[in-house]
Image (cartoon, rainbow, N blue to C red):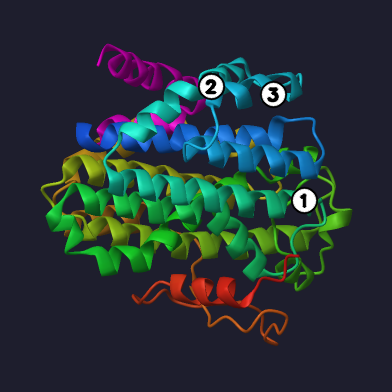
């Protein structure tokens, strides 16, 4: 019992050192959810460290990820993996990430102590993320991904699976939320993609420094831009147009995120705040990106502490009022371009008009179903 309490205290202590955003939003959750969601985030962060911060070959990294899944499922001792992994971490790995790897046993012990539905959802999320994230990192380059559908799939593996997992945790926590399962599941991947696309757009130049770009070539070629030839100090006019198109896509996904949040019962104010704060910060970041064409680094489009404080305060004040939350979203998103998700063609057969078409946003079902179908049929990423 004392060990479990110490492990929970360690989770809470390490979280702000590896994610300021989640350290802000997770404490809004009710205690029965807070432990599992913190645990899930830290497990995903360990997986990300294995993929991004080790000096091993691609095959060796995949082996380490498989071992991490085995640790999570109780088939290997965490200490053995930690001892093998620590010497392989790159010199620039953050001290907090090293500490998290060293203490992965404490995190995994807490996973094992969760109730079965929570544990199954988290294990599934981490396993899918490890496989998909590695697949994309192996083909990462500054040339970008080929198609919009590839960006969708990348966002699914690094974020959409988290949206699915959170939905499972929310439903396991509350019978009232369980009754909204169908609607929440239909929107969960889109919610996560809105947040992930916002980060991709904000971090485009930082990612390129690391040799990666997750922007779709098909979008930018329509605007006369070859991503492989892009330089931050010499951005062609078409690059701003392509970024604006993707801002519109992210905006559409964030509208799905709001629809998801409004399906959470009004009485679950902590879960609503957890969602609303993330949505509000993402919308304001898109506003900064839209207002700063030609930006050359993430900090140039980072929102201020005052904006964060205002977003959280307004969200808290309106948390039970759906009509007011819609008004606040519309006000925050004023002036942003807006795209409507078009029907996806089968892999390898892009439509003549491209995967996205700009138009007024209309309320409708999420396109998670199309993404699920595409993943079953196969992706263009090999």
Classify mark 1: helix, strand or loop.
Answer: helix
Name the residue located 49 percent from the left edge and 78 percent from the top edge: 359
With 259 as the anchor, is 180 left or right in this view?
A: left
Q: Where is the N terminus found, in terms of image quarters?
A: top left
Total marks shown come to 3
Q: Main secondary structure of the magenta part?
A: helix
Name the residue located 40 percent from the left edge and 27 percent from the top edge: 109
Q: Eyeballing the image, is 64 above or below 161? A: above
Give the class, few, some or many, for how many residues have Cα within 10 Å of label 2's Cα (few <14, many ≥20). Answer: many
Q: Eyeballing the image, is 54 above or below 182? A: above
Q: What residue span does the magenta drawing correspond to?
A: 1-29
The residue identified by callout 2 is: 100
Residues under labels 2 and 3: Cα distance?
A: 14 Å
The residue identified by callout 3 is: 84
Residues under labels 1 and 2: Cα distance?
A: 24 Å
Going from N to C along the chain, the mark reached first, 1 or 2, is: 2
Residue 3 included in the magenta stretch of the image: yes
The residue identified by callout 1 is: 138
Going from N to C along the chain, the mark reached first, 3 or 1, is: 3
Going from N to C along the chain, the mark reached first, 2 or 3, is: 3
Would you say residue 291 is visible in this rendering?
no
With 360 as the anchor, is 130 left or right in this view?
A: right
Give the class, few, some or many, for how many residues have Cα within 10 Å of label 3's Cα (few <14, many ≥20). Answer: few
Classify mark 2: helix, strand or loop.
Answer: helix
Residue 41: image location, x then y, percent: 45, 36
Q: Eyeballing the image, is 94 above or below 157? A: above
Name the residue located 25 percent from the left edge and 36 percent from the top edge: 29
Q: Quadrant of residue 352?
A: bottom right
User: Camera-side residue: 114 or 226?
Assistant: 114
Q: Which label lies toward us, 3 or 1?
A: 3
Classify mark 3: helix, strand or loop.
Answer: helix
């Amino acid at each position: 019992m004392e060990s479990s309490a110490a492990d929970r205290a360690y989770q809470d202590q390490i979280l702000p050192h590896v994610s300021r955003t989640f350290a802000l939003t997770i404490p809004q959750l009710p205690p029965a959810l807070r432990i599992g969601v913190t645990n899930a985030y830290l497990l995903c962060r360990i997986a990300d460290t294995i993929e991004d911060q080790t000096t091993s070959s691609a095959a060796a990294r995949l082996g380490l990820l498989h071992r991490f899944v085995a640790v999570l499922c109780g088939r290997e001792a965490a200490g053995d993996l930690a001892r093998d992994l620590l010497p392989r971490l790159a010199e620039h790995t953050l001290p907090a990430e090293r500490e998290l790897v060293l203490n992965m046993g404490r995190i995994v012990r807490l996973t094992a102590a969760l109730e079965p539905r929570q544990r199954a959802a988290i294990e599934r999320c981490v396993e899918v993320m490890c496989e998909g994230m590695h697949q994309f990192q192996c083909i990462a380059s500054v040339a970008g991904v080929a198609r919009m559908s590839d960006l969708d799939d990348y966002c699914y593996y690094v974020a959409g699976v988290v949206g699915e997992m959170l939905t499972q945790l929310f439903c396991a926590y509350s019978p009232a939320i369980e009754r909204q399962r169908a609607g929440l599941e239909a929107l969960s991947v889109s919610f996560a993609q809105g947040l992930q696309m916002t980060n991709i757009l904000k971090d485009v130049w930082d990612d390129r420094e690391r040799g990666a770009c997750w922007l779709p070539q098909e979008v930018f070629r329509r605007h006369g831009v070859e991503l492989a030839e892009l330089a931050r100090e010499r951005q062609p006019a078409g690059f701003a147009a392509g970024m604006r198109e993707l801002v519109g896509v992210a905006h559409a996904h964030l509208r799905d995120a709001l629809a998801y949040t409004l399906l959470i019962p009004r009485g679950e104010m902590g879960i609503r705040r957890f969602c609303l704060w993330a949505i509000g910060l993402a919308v304001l970041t898109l506003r900064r990106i839209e207002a700063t064409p030609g930006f050359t680094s993430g900090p140039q489009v980072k929102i201020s502490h005052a904006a964060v404080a205002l977003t959280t305060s307004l969200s808290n004040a309106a948390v039970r009022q759906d009509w007011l939350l819609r008004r606040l979203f519309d006000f925050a998103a004023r002036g942003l371009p807006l795209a409507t998700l078009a029907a996806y063609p089968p892999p390898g057969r892009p439509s003549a008009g491209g995967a996205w078409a700009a138009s007024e946003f209309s309320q409708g079902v999420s396109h998670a179903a199309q993404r699920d179908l595409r993943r079953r049929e196969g992706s263009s990423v090999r």
